[in-house]
Every structure is written in structure tokens, then in C-alpha cells.
Amino acid sequence: MTVEQTQVEESAEQLAPVGRGVELCYQTYGDPADEPLLLVMGLGGPMTWWDPEFCRELARAGFYVIRFDNRDIGRSTKLDSIANARVTFPKLAKAFLGLRVTPPYTLTDMADDAVGLLDHLGVGSAHLFGISMGGMIVQTMAITHPDRVRSLVSMMSTTGRRTVGFQHPSLIPTLLARQVGRQAYVEGSVKIWRLIGSPGFPSTEAEVRKRAEDTYERGISGSAVARQMLAVVSQPDRTTDLRRVTVPMTVVHGLADKMVHVSGGRATSMAVPGAELLLIDGMGHDLPQALWPTYVAAVRRTADRAR
């Protein structure tokens, strides 16, 4: 039986209490005896944006794969009742301009959620793979919980420094557009993915529409996404703290990424001593199937450096 044909054990979705009144919905793929790999998704994305077959490919590469819904997304806890929960457009605008605001929660809180999930699973330390906002979260984990991190892959993300990793100005109206109801969410998703998807590895509109429909049904809330967005735009500059990261790290970024400019990836790799930088022509701000082997190889190569 070839590696590609090997069957992968996968768990049912479960809820894990991770502290501070938050429960995360998670699922695992592979053998618990293998090296744990925590996948952390980006803004507004449930764990289902990590395609199950991609998770299986990572498991076949020797990992015990853990995917989960971040707080406020999917089947994890929605935080509508916490203090300062309502995020207004003026507050987001202030944060975009670099003015001081107090978000309902921070990327550090989200990093602590992920550590709480590792605690729940009895995992002392794990390899981390985060994309976009998830890349910011795993960077934060490496800074605040270095003993829990074996290696780190940060993809299409940035350091939090405002002069790098910026959005293309043409995206801002679409990102801030209000979407009420299933149809509006789906149509808005199709529109944004036309703008930020990989031009060299395009998805079909049917694929994008199906994913948006599944995401909405799983549990999406405009106010919840706004809270995540405020956590992102109010994040601190991690550049100095990243210089103290000692675990193996690979930074992956698309040269056609309009959501997070490639300068964010370059700055991240420059901040972390010994980090590998992998730039991919034609890749935007998504996970095209044609590039899965490249991503799996990068995660495996980075984890092997930890040995």
C-alpha cells in the first residue's frame, strides 16, 4: 500500500473547554502517537477551510493533525455577551488608522485558546501551521508560550508592523461591506475571493460558492468576524519579540497576495533568526489544491529541522 493510499484515522468533532468561558470545536486526523501538528485558520474561517483531504495528506506525512474553529467562528463559543463585544465601524476605522482602541479580545487571547486546546488533548508541545490571522496567532504562541512550540510555519501573514503586510486599497470597501443573511454572505464571499484568490491557481466559482454556503451553515456572524478583525488591526508589532524565537520556522507567502502584501512575509522571515522564506509565484490569499504538496513538504521539512 502506497503512502497516498494509506487510510487515515479521523475523529468526530468535539468541544474542548479552554478557559475563560470559551469552548473550541476541534477534530483530529492521524495517529495520536505521531508528531502533533496544530492548524490555525485565518479571519472569519472555520476549521473546514482546512480541507479534510489536505489534513489527511499532512497526517500521511507523519503528523497527528488537529484542526479547530477559533473563538467566535463555526461551532466554537460566540462571545456576544462579553464586555465591549459590539464593534462599531468608527472603532474599526480608528484601529485601521493606527489609533488606540480596546478590542473585546486580542490575538494573545486567541493564542491562549490554542494552548488550552493542547492542554485538553494532553499535548505538551506541537508543530504549528497558521495562515493569515492564524499565522499571527502561531507567531504569538511562539512568543508567549515558547515551551509549547516545536516548529512554526507562518503562511500569508505578517509581523503586525503597519508598514508591511498591508491590504491592497481596492479591497477595503469589500472587506468592510455589511453582509446580512445567507445570500449576501455567499455573494460577498464570491466577490472577495475573486479579488484575493490565486491567479496562478484559480478556484472555480462553484467551489468558492459551495465553501461559502458551508461556512454560513456552520455558523458565521458579522459581529463575531468584526471582533476578530479588530483583534487583527489592533495587534502590536511583534518584530522585536520574534527575534527571540529559536524554533525552526518557515514563512510561506504568495507573490500575488492582495490581502496581506508579501512584505509581511519577508519581514517575518527577517525577524526570526534562521527562518526559511518560501515565495510562490501566482499564489494569492488562499490554499489552492495544486500547491498542497508544496505546503506539506514545507511543514515536514520545518518539523524535521526541530529534530
Image (cartoon, grey):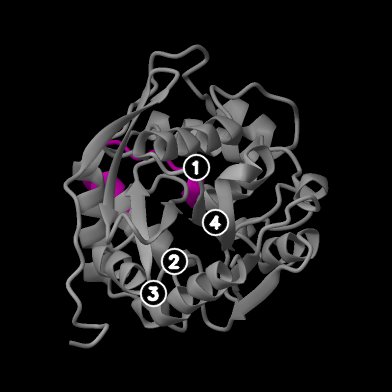
Pointer 4: what residue? 171
Residue shown at 60%/57% (left/top)?
157
Task: Give the percent coordinates (x, y) of residue 186.
Answer: 27, 52
Query: What label does residue 288 carry, if any?
Result: 3
Structural distance between the alpha carbons of marks 3 and 4: 20 Å
Which numbered disc flags the more N-terminal residue, 1 or 3?
1
Query: In the image, which is nearer the foreground, mark 1 or mark 2?
Result: 2
Residue 156 placement: quadrant: bottom right
Task: Give the percent coordinates (x, y) of residue 173.
Answer: 52, 49
Magenta-tinted stretch: 174-188
Amino acid type at circle 2 is Asp
Query: In the image, which is nearer the foreground, mark 1 or mark 3?
Result: 3
Amino acid type at circle 1 is Leu
Structural distance between the alpha carbons of marks 1 and 3: 25 Å
Residue 181 visible: no
Q: Is residue 245 found left or right of 34 in the rendered image?
A: right
